[in-house]
Amino acid sequence: MSDVIVNAVDVTKVYRRGRVEVQALRSVSLQVKRGEIVGIMGPSGSGKTTLLNIIGGLDKPSSGRVFVDGVEITSLDEGKLAGYRLKRIGFVFQSYNLLPTLTALENVELPMALAGLPKAKRRERALKLLRMVGLEARAYHMPEELSGGEQQRVAVARALANNPSLVLADEPTGDLDSTSARGLMGLIEHLNRENRQTFIIVTHDPLVAERCSSVYHIRDGRIESL
Ligand SMILES: Nc1ncnc2c1ncn2[C@@H]1O[C@H](COP(=O)(O)OP(=O)(O)O)[C@@H](O)[C@H]1O
Ligand SMILES: [Mg+2]
């Protein structure tokens, strides 16, 4: 297994709004080693989310190539990419994106159901994941009955459901108080140590950045050299 889990090579992204072009990423190259916790910081609009979405296969670059875990995801068709994303990549969104009509447990089970894991197995694993994030007692609660910190922990459990080698988090502590933010970082460090999972975390939060193994700064679509 290669030591490099993410290799982004000369990635550019141009969005077109009618006649207006927005250069969201300009020739970004980035290598992340397996087992790292990487922070990405930068002003609003600098291209952080675009970069994360391209690494996670949620968006396609205008040019450049992205390899994740040895697979060139920029050359996969939509069907293959969806399968790859489901099994190998976990996403934690700032706004949690839990499905409001499902319980915490069902939210965590969902990616496993999509991956075809039998019902008994996914229930068992979802409960284990909720226990790990300290929310077993909330398994049968609906998202709206949970605090922001609790919802974010459910979102982390869901991101881990299919045991991804890479977890991408977009401002995961953005809506959390500092105690919850510290708790979430503690959890991420634990997972990183125990499962050797790699994390890329977009953040504005110095408290998060100081706990990353490396931090990149992005400005105006470019990674700033340090
Ligand atoms: N779907 C889109 N269509 C057009 N422009 C977009 C789209 N998504 C992002 N942008 C633009 O690309 C730039 C980078 O956006 P984004 O990656 O979301 O920045 P950040 O996450 O750092 O705040 C911004 O100028 C934003 O307005
Ligand atoms: Mg963003």
Image (cartoon, grey):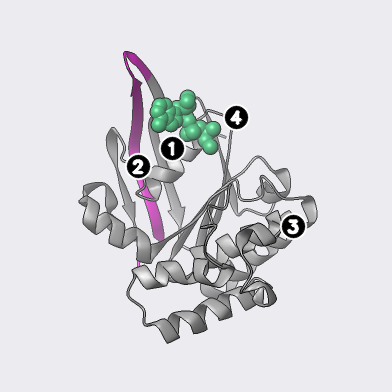
Q: Which mark is residue 50?
A: 1
Pointer 3 residue: 180
Across and down, in percent, residue 170 comes to: 54, 47
Q: Secondary structure at mark 3?
A: helix
Pointer 2 residue: 59
Q: Secondary structure at mark 2?
A: loop
Q: Secondary structure at mark 4?
A: loop
Dot 1, how many residues are within 10 Å of its Cα: few (below 14), some (14-19), or many (20+)? many
Q: Is mark 4 within 8 Å of ligand 1?
A: yes
State the separation of the CA atoms marked 2 and 3: 30 Å
Q: Amino acid at mark 1?
A: Thr
| Nearer-N-terminus badge (4/1) | 4
State the separation of the CA atoms marked 4 and 1: 13 Å
| Nearer-N-terminus badge (4/3) | 4
Q: Is mark 1 within 8 Å of ligand 1?
A: yes
State the separation of the CA atoms marked 4 and 3: 23 Å
Please report the bounds of the magenta region as a residue range: 1-21
Instruction: Tell me if residue 49 comes above or below residue 148 in the rendering.
Output: above
Q: Secondary structure at mark 1?
A: helix
Q: Residue at x 61, y 60 (%)?
A: 143
Q: Nearer the viewer, residue 23 or 198?
A: 23
| Nearer-N-terminus badge (4/2) | 4
